[in-house]
Amino acid sequence: MKILLASPIDPAAHERLQRHHDVRGLNGTDLRAASADREVVVLRSGVLLSEDVLCGADALRLVVRAGSGVDNIDLDCARRRGVRVVRVPGMSAPPVAEFTFALLLSLARNVTLADRLVRTGHWPKPDLGGPLLRGKVLGIVGAGNIGGEVGELAAAWDMEVLGCVAHPSDAVADNLARRGIRLCGFDEVVTSADFVTLHVPLDESTQHMIDAAVLERMRPGSLLVNVARGGVVDEKALYEALVDSSTVAGAALDVHETEGEGTVPALAELPNVVLTPHIGAMALDSQRLIGERVVDLVHAFARGSFDEEVRDGEHVV
């Protein structure tokens, strides 16, 4: 099959695909031109598979999202054109959950700020105190696959964990309770928590769900961590809230409204912010597993056993 790797994948997986298929990378080529004759496109976040690109790829039959979110794929267009879309969600949950805690600890205990100061010869130890996590309230917006794992980690740290989901039910509440998470509404999560973490997809219902009104309702001294998608947070409102600091006192963002080489977020000006370049899922172990699953899905599609081998939660279109 003719495959476009629009994003890098694990090197071993790349090599396996090359042994059996015609594999091409972008290599600086325009995405529309590169995908024009391809039957399969494999991509990660940061690559936009728009209607324009899809309509220019007459041979395209399969899109594989090497990760969880599909907000960078025009699903309506894919559906109209009969292009199958699958994702590889399961392997991303553990690394993103662990990275959530890395950001939370870095923010709460001023790790990155302290690192910057020491590198310039400053040792202001009395000014770098921060709260314990133990005994505090963690609020999880989107207590699903990744958020549930974050909640389990928080419960192990002896935190009180609150979580909300888009479609609550008794079954969901029971499942979360077994993981140490109490199901409640969105408003209770953001107003009661010392630390709020975000784990929701980006769609019309979640665009700027953390806006000025929500930030005003957060507890004084609270911290916000976004490992979901940049558009979930109104970053202009967050900037103003962090400057004011009467409610939310700090934020850590792995995802941003504008991402890409050369982009400097406005939030970078503030000392009470930790910023990383969308690397939550980039644990090497997980990337190896994602790569293996990408290869399995492509091979299944090539031999005609795709529908039998796709797992629950992978098929999108």
Image (cartoon, rainbow, N blue to C red):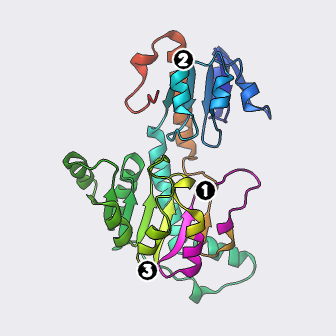
Q: Amino acid at mark 3?
A: Pro
Verify CB contact (< 8 Å) between mark 2 and mark 3. Answer: no
Q: Nearer the viewer, residue 66 or 317?
A: 317
**Residue 84 visible in the snapshot:** no
Element assignment for label 1 = loop
Residue 54 position within the rendered picture, expressed as x and y whole percent measured from the top left: 63, 26
**Residue 126 visible in the snapshot:** yes
Q: Amino acid at mark 2?
A: His
Residue 297 position within the rendered picture, expressed as x and y whole percent measured from the top left: 51, 23
Q: Which label belongs to residue 299?
A: 2
**Is 22 included in the stretch rendered in magenta?**
no
Give the farthest residue toward the bottom.
126
Label 3 neighbour load within 10 Å: few <14, some 14-19, many 20+: some
Residue 295 position within the rendered picture, expressed as x and y whole percent measured from the top left: 56, 24
Q: Is residue 119 above or below residue 77?
A: below
The residue that disc 3 covers is 220
Element assignment for label 3 = loop
| Sequence-first tag of 1 and 2 | 1
Residues at marks 2 and 3, CA–CA distance in whole angstroms: 53 Å
| Sequence-first tag of 1 and 3 | 3
Q: Amino acid at mark 1?
A: His
Label 2 neighbour load within 10 Å: few <14, some 14-19, many 20+: some
Q: Nearer the viewer, residue 134 or 38?
A: 38
The residue that disc 1 covers is 256
Number of marks in the rendered image:
3
Q: Is residue 205 above or below residue 154?
A: above
Mark toward the viewer: 1 or 2: 1
Magenta stretch: give its range. 239-267
Mark toward the viewer: 2 or 3: 3
Verify CB contact (< 8 Å) between mark 1 and mark 3. Answer: no
